[in-house]
Amino acid sequence: MLSAHAFAERCAEHPLVLDGGLATELARRGHDLSDPLWSARVLLDDPDAIERVHYDYYAAGAEIAITASYQVTYEGMAARGFDAGTTTAVLRHAVALADSARSRIQRERGAGAAGLLVAASVGPYGAMLHDGSEYHGDYERTVDALADFHRHRLAVLIGTGPDLLACETIPSLDEARALIRVLRETPAATAWITFTARDGTHTAHGEPIADCAAELDAEPQILAVGVNCVAPGLVTQLAGEMRRGTRKPIVVYPNAGDVWDSARRAWIDGPSQPRIGDLAAEWIAAGASAIGGCCRTTPADIGAVAAAVGSAA
C-alpha cells in the first residue's frame, strides 16, 4: 500500500483531486437507495453502474476513486439475510470495480493516467446502524468493541490490495482510535481518517478537531487526516484547525451543503451556497492537500475542483 512518505510527496507536487458522491450520484441516475444497505444494494444488483460512476469521476479529473464498500459490513449484510461469504465477496468486488474503472481510463489515456489511485472505503459503525449515528457518534461502544466491529472488514479490504484505506465519516476520536488499533495489526496497511464535524472546531461527537489531528499526527500508518460529509462553509475553519495539530496532509471532501434528515432517510436541500469548485482555492490556502466531494456532489463538481487545482498549481 502507499506509504505515508509517498502520499505526502504526491500532495506536495499539487493538491490531489478526489472523486465525489457515489451513492447520491447513483440515486441521481435513477437507482433506488432506500434499502438499509444503501449503495451496497447496487453492488449486489447492478455493479456495472458503480463502475460507470467511478469511471466518470476519473474522466472528470479525479485522481483517487473511493470504493463503494462504505456500507458493506458483516453485521449489516447479515441483517438483510446475507452470509459472511457473500459479504466478503461484495467487499472484494467493490475494490475490483474501482480498479476496473481505473484500468479503463488508463487504457484510454495512457501515461497521462498512470498515477490514479484507489482508496477502499471504510465507513463508521454508525453507517451500519442506518440511523444517522455517523453524524453524532453517540454509540455507547468501547474502543475495544469498535475495533472488533471493524477488524474483519479491514482485513478483507487490505487483502484486495488497494492503494490505501479511506476511513471516512468518522464521528469521534474513539472510533478513530479503534481503527488505528486494527491497522496496527497489519503494519503495511495505510489509511486516511476523515471526521464528521458539528461546527468549525469540533468533531460530530464533540472533541476538538485540532486535538484529534494532533493525536493522529504520531501514527505512522495514517497518511492524512481531514473531514468529509460536512457543510462546505465549515471546511476552511476545520482545515485551519487541523493544520494546527498536524504536519500530515489534510483531506477535505464536504457534501454539497444539504441537510441529512435521519428520520426520513433523505437529503433536504440546504440554503444556497457556493459549489465546492468555487471554494477549492480557499481550502488549499487554508492547508488542504486533497480535495473532493461527498454526498450530492457530482462529476461536474469534481471537474470544477480539478480546474481550480490546476489554476492554483
Image: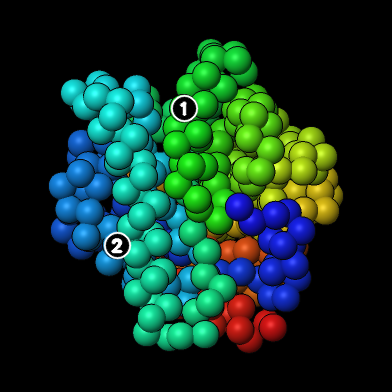
Location of residue 270 in the rendering, given as x and y in whole percent from the top left corner: 40, 53
Residue 162 visible at all: yes
Question: Which residue is at the front of the view, 236 or 17?
Answer: 17
Question: Which residue is at the front of the view, 197 or 69?
Answer: 69
Residue 266 visible at all: no
Q: Which residue is mark 1?
A: 152
Q: Amino acid at mark 1?
A: His
Q: Are marks 1 and 2 in contact (CB under 8 Å)?
A: no
The residue under the point 60% across, 57% down is 252
Packing grade of label 2 (10 A; few <14, some 14-19, many >=20) is many
Location of residue 9 in the rendering, given as x and y in whole percent from the top left corner: 75, 67
Location of residue 306 in the rendering, given as x and y in whole percent from the top left corner: 53, 78
- Which comes before the other along the chain, label 1 or label 2? 2
| Distance CA(mark 1)–CA(mark 2) | 25 Å
Q: Is residue 83 left or right of residue 118?
A: left
At mark 1, the secondary structure is: helix
Q: Amino acid at mark 2?
A: Glu
Packing grade of label 1 (10 A; few <14, some 14-19, many >=20) is some
Q: Which residue is mark 2?
A: 51
